[in-house]
Image (cartoon, coloured by chain):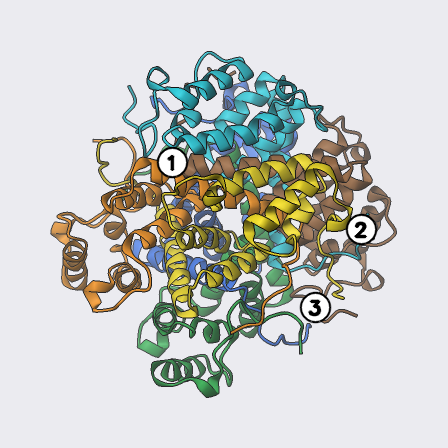
Chain colours: A blue, B green, C orange, D yellow, E cyan, F brown
Amino acid sequence: MSTLRPATVRPVEEAEATGKVAEIFADIKQTKQIDFVPNMWRVLATNPLQLELVWNTLKPLMHPEAVGRTPALPPQTREIIALAVSATNGCRYCVNSHTTAVKKLGLSNEALGEVMAIVGLFNMTNKLADGYQIEPDVLPPLE
Amino acid sequence: MSTLRPATVRPVEEAEATGKVAEIFADIKQTKQIDFVPNMWRVLATNPLQLELVWNTLKPLMHPEAVGRTPALPPQTREIIALAVSATNGCRYCVNSHTTAVKKLGLSNEALGEVMAIVGLFNMTNKLADGYQIEPDVLPPLE
Amino acid sequence: MSTLRPATVRPVEEAEATGKVAEIFADIKQTKQIDFVPNMWRVLATNPLQLELVWNTLKPLMHPEAVGRTPALPPQTREIIALAVSATNGCRYCVNSHTTAVKKLGLSNEALGEVMAIVGLFNMTNKLADGYQIEPDVLPPLE
Amino acid sequence: MSTLRPATVRPVEEAEATGKVAEIFADIKQTKQIDFVPNMWRVLATNPLQLELVWNTLKPLMHPEAVGRTPALPPQTREIIALAVSATNGCRYCVNSHTTAVKKLGLSNEALGEVMAIVGLFNMTNKLADGYQIEPDVLPPLE
Amino acid sequence: MSTLRPATVRPVEEAEATGKVAEIFADIKQTKQIDFVPNMWRVLATNPLQLELVWNTLKPLMHPEAVGRTPALPPQTREIIALAVSATNGCRYCVNSHTTAVKKLGLSNEALGEVMAIVGLFNMTNKLADGYQIEPDVLPPLE
Amino acid sequence: MSTLRPATVRPVEEAEATGKVAEIFADIKQTKQIDFVPNMWRVLATNPLQLELVWNTLKPLMHPEAVGRTPALPPQTREIIALAVSATNGCRYCVNSHTTAVKKLGLSNEALGEVMAIVGLFNMTNKLADGYQIEPDVLPPLE
């Protein structure tokens, strides 16, 4: 319906997926409890190895319960990291996707504002530290 | 002792600070419960307005208790955002400073590994989304 | 009128602003001598503290006359820095906003070309310096 | 004397430069009125075409008087752009080099603080604009 | 036909180009064997010096045959570098342009997937190395 | 011997590695045909899952022969992509590591100069395209 291209390659349709791609598409929908395959995964599927490697990295980190792992961080914190990275990188698809995800996990718009304010603040201080090439303070011994 | 310069400008010594700079240095030490002024703030003090603006932005966001504000996010999550931003930007001073801070707040090296793995993961997916110019999925209505 | 969402959150309408948000909206319009509140500030207003912190940082730096401060740099140079940063970061909203601003301050398209050519040049040399990990030249003593 | 490598390749010594490289080295020293060839150019000289292309781009933009060109921007503004880009990119060599240059052109440490504060500010707002995916305000017609 | 502005400045039409701009437009079309001037060059032409400097840098590197130079790298590898840089920077125009170019040079969508997977991978490891501030391994002597 | 910390965490020594970490360390040494474990992997090992996920992504992409896969790109091109990404990101560890790797694969310093010149060029054009917000040229139909 849009005049924008969905990507620089034609995303793989769910109906045309076979073999490993079809399996991963099914796993994505079940693990994420959604009834469609997001554009990201349909695009990665144009190279099945790529699809597999990215999913195999994301699944245990972001859906630890699906692999029987006990995570160190709660789900909302994990998605907030994803959003902080995406905002810092200015990635349009990712900001949209992870904002939707943090809201699903209960973050209000005002709390989102706190996340963004902190992201903005440290982008400012990062550039000040780099812009002056400030040396680290005396460092504590490594443990 | 080091042959590295501490910065591209000479940081203001605590002993030579006067007026507003001295006040802010004292506030930083008290608010952060530390007994020295980190290099960052000593460098910003070469322009007192700059010191004031950055501190006035950081203090209510990262030390909300000092201004009687109830934050939306717990302290460790706020520092994790700072670290995720700093790692994404590759800021040396900031990575050192915020790693020290999250450890002080109780994050183990293994949990730090989970933070970094998630930061790394989404830097990967961000570049894949941008590298293919993937369009956002159908968007939920705004609230 | 557009099918693009204005942001990942619904911007606060001027008509619905109250209290501190309404005050800052009024101050923005008066300080910037404009008759509408730009999308940026309407979005930041979804978290009033965020709105306040960003405005309190931007106002004295970019509108020093409004706070009785004598700036070190002329207005056009300050906006050129804003544009150079925004181009380097590839920030769409910011490039549009700061290009409009530098043109209002009298920069011709040809002079804008000089700004951009210099921005492009140093993005090239930055990556060459980093790509070879070139050490700084002998450094002058700090003053 | 340092244990740090000067770069990932061995910089070309002035004494060993011949042909086009020697000519460009001489032109750099004369144009910049310095008595040594900075590390940057000695490293680029490991591929003479690279040296030539970068110098041919930088010379007319940053030393317009040497090619009889009337620039749109004054020298200090041009160097401030270089520094703003370098701080935003966090490029160590470049920050050191362009800070030295703006100081040579008369910028005080306090004025440098204003530059940095503005660079920091817009890195913050850039990330807020991207982090919320804020749409540009209504755009003025192109001229 | 689109409601999107083509750029923040009005691109120079081929029909209105004169002098050096017209010459470079003709050279671009002949060198690239295309029958139109891409938006990029039409925008750069708003400052003729800028157009000239960028074209004079790009032509010998990306079209070495046009200047009688023997390149070190084959054409597809050169375009893959362009795409890897553009994906890492998230540059929309550039990703579209260089994806078109690598496909013209025979890269299949599956091979493009390998390029992107490698780009994504090293963006991940880059941020891990920076996020932990990992020191370089023992370095081989410079040649 | 250095006063620099090797990282913000203590890298795992080869001698203290057990279980899955020891297995991966052995696989890294055998696959890469080296007799030590680079700092990168020793640091990632502070969280064994992280070590596993990164190695499982890197191994099939960069050492396809070790998993019986036929790659689309030759080894030198793959390492050149790694270096182009690392230079663009300014990642110190990564630039050192991938420069060593491309040299091992036979790239001369002059050819490295061609890689860097192309990396620099497209970082320049990327920022020009973003700095002017140039719209993509008419797009070819997707295949």
Q: Which mark is residue B65?
A: none
> Disc 2: which chain?
E
Rounded to the nearest whole Å, what is the CA distance between mark 3 and mark 1? 42 Å
Closer to us: mark 3 or mark 1?
A: 1
**Relative vertical location of residue B128 with respect to residue C38 in this rendering, above or below:** above
What x and y, as percent, mark residue C130?
Answer: 62, 50
**Is residue E41 visible from the viewing direction of this image?**
yes
Q: Chain of mark 3?
A: F
Q: Nearer the viewer, residue D23 or D104?
A: D23
The C terminus of chain D lies in quadrant? top left
Residue at the image point whose x is 43% and y is 39% from the top: D69
* Residue drawn 52% across the image and 42% down it: D59
Q: Is residue D112 above or below residue E31?
A: below
Left or right of C89 on screen, residue A73: right
Q: Give the Cα distance between marks 3 and 2.
A: 21 Å
Q: Which mark is residue E142?
A: 2
Secondary structure under the numbered disc 3 in the rendered image: loop
Does dot 2 land on a helix, a strand or a loop? loop
* Amino acid under disc 3: Leu
Which mark, by number, is residue F4?
A: 3
Residue F99 lies, in percent from the top left, at 73, 45
x and y, in percent, of residue D42 in the image = 68, 48
Q: Earlier in the sequence, mark 3 or mark 1?
A: 3
Q: Nearer the viewer, mark 3 or mark 2?
A: 2
Q: For the N terminus of chain D, which image quadrant?
A: bottom right
User: Residue, x 84% and y 50% (percent of image)?
Assistant: F26
Residue F84 located left or right of residue C88: right
